[in-house]
Amino acid sequence: MAIIERVNELTYPYATHPPRGTTVEVAEGVRWLTMPMGGSLNHINLYLIEDRDGWYVVDTGLGTEETESLWRDLFANELNGDPVKGVICTHMHPDHIGQAGMITKEFHCPFYMTRAEYYQARAFALGGNASSQYGADWQGVQFYRRYGMQDDYVQKLAAPTRGGVSGGWRQRRGNTAAPFPLGFHRLQDGDTMTIGDHDWQVVVGAGHSPEHACLHCKSLGVLISGDQILPVITSNVSVHPTEPEANPLHIWMESHDKFLDTPPETLVLPAHNLPFYGVRERLRQLISHHEDRLLAIEEHCVQPRLAAELLPVLFRRKLDARQTMMALGEAIAHCHLLMHRNRLQRTLCEDGRYRFLSIDPDLERRAHPEQHDAPDDQPILV
Ligand SMILES: [Zn+2]
């Protein structure tokens, strides 16, 4: 995930986030609140949808004591004395699911999620998470070596979870052993949930996470977009050692097509940054941003390149070990999409490393090496 530095054509109806522990009504029966996050992300946006006799919670914040305590204040002060009737999580990342177990236990209410997100979250809740485990495994070592990371980096990744690159990072982010609901109600693309007087349609995206649910209410003109569509930063779209041949940028691009006919007057309620109008403009910006990165990679790969050598093409600043892991995942995602388009060829060389070479004879005509977006400043995982 990275900051896009182009001029933003979006409209932001709110200049600031609601103060911690308070909510703001952004549409009839829809309330916006934030919960704290570390690092430059700072916050996650969560939403409450009012039913006739209670509330639905959309996303829940990190599994930290601070977030739990803020929730308990909200239960006491912001719900008009009504209960939570259901918890909906857009996807399985820790800032979205961290309090799902606490809230569903407190109110004995159902938990709604798509199936792929639910079971991935369950797997991570059992034993840490993929990024802390795969470094130590032969598959993780092979993955990072093949994509060109130096041996000392791979050894650091393989260090025991608690002190390793990824383990320490996850702990700082609050991915603690917060309880996770042991049962769920499955959401599927096209499902409708009727809450209060309004129908909310489930629109499933992918690429950032396996089966990300967005909620679209046509009658209110509101789209709760989670991490699928963000206004300022871009969602992290990465290949991980758990599925080394994945093509997540392809499915991310494809799933954006599903949102292209969202009515232009729709208020988008994202999980990070501020609510905005301009969903179609934002989709166009995101797609052209990635197309620009893809072309820059093709231009760089006129000589055979390691994926690790592409990081300066995508990211300007010096990356620490954790950021390097995320940035590499993004670089590989771009390479895999280019392979799918028959524009890059991947060869496993004698040194055990993959090298990528541009093979499109039309590249010379398409290339514009001096006119790319500036490389992004900082990848941030959401
Ligand atoms: Zn996310």
Image: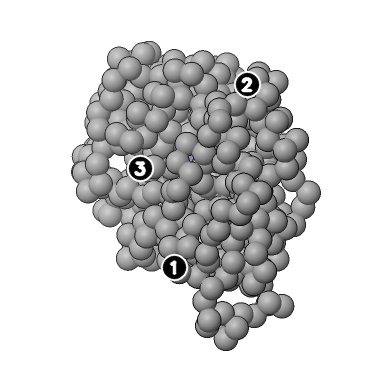
**Residue position for label 1:** 341
Q: Is residue 288 above or below residue 208?
A: below
Residue at the location (61% across, 41% down)? 144
Q: Residue at x 56, y 53 (%)?
A: 348
Three-letter amino acid code at disc 1?
Arg
Residue visible at 63% across and 51% down? 350
Residue located farthest toward the bottom when viewing the structure as drawn: 365
Name the residue tied to disc 2. 161
Cα gap from disc 3 to disc 1, whole angstroms = 23 Å
* Neighbours of disc 2 within 10 Å: few (<14), some (14-19), many (20+): many
Q: Confirm or deny contact between disc 1 and disc 2 (CB under 8 A).
A: no
Point 26% across, 53% down: residue: 219
The answer to whether the beta carbon of the residue marked 2 is less than 8 Å from any atom of ligand 1 is no
* Closer to us: 142 or 247: 142
Q: Quadrant of residue 110?
A: top left
Q: Residues within 10 Å of mark 3 (few under 14, many from 20)?
A: many
The residue that mark 3 highlights is 211
Q: Image check: 95 left or right of 200?
A: right
Q: Which mark is first along the chain, 2 or 3?
A: 2
Callout 1 secondary element:
loop
Indicate the position of residue 133 as horizontal and vertical percent values.
Answer: 55, 26
The C terminus, quarter of image: top right
Local crowd size for mark 1, using a 10 Å CA cut-off: few (<14), some (14–19), many (≥20): few
| Badge 2 amino acid | Thr
Mark 1 and ligand 1: say if the CB distance to the nearest ligand atom is below 8 Å.
Answer: no
Which mark is nearer the camera, 3 or 2?
A: 2
Q: CA distance from mark 3 to mark 2?
A: 27 Å
Q: Earlier in the sequence, mark 1 or mark 2?
A: 2
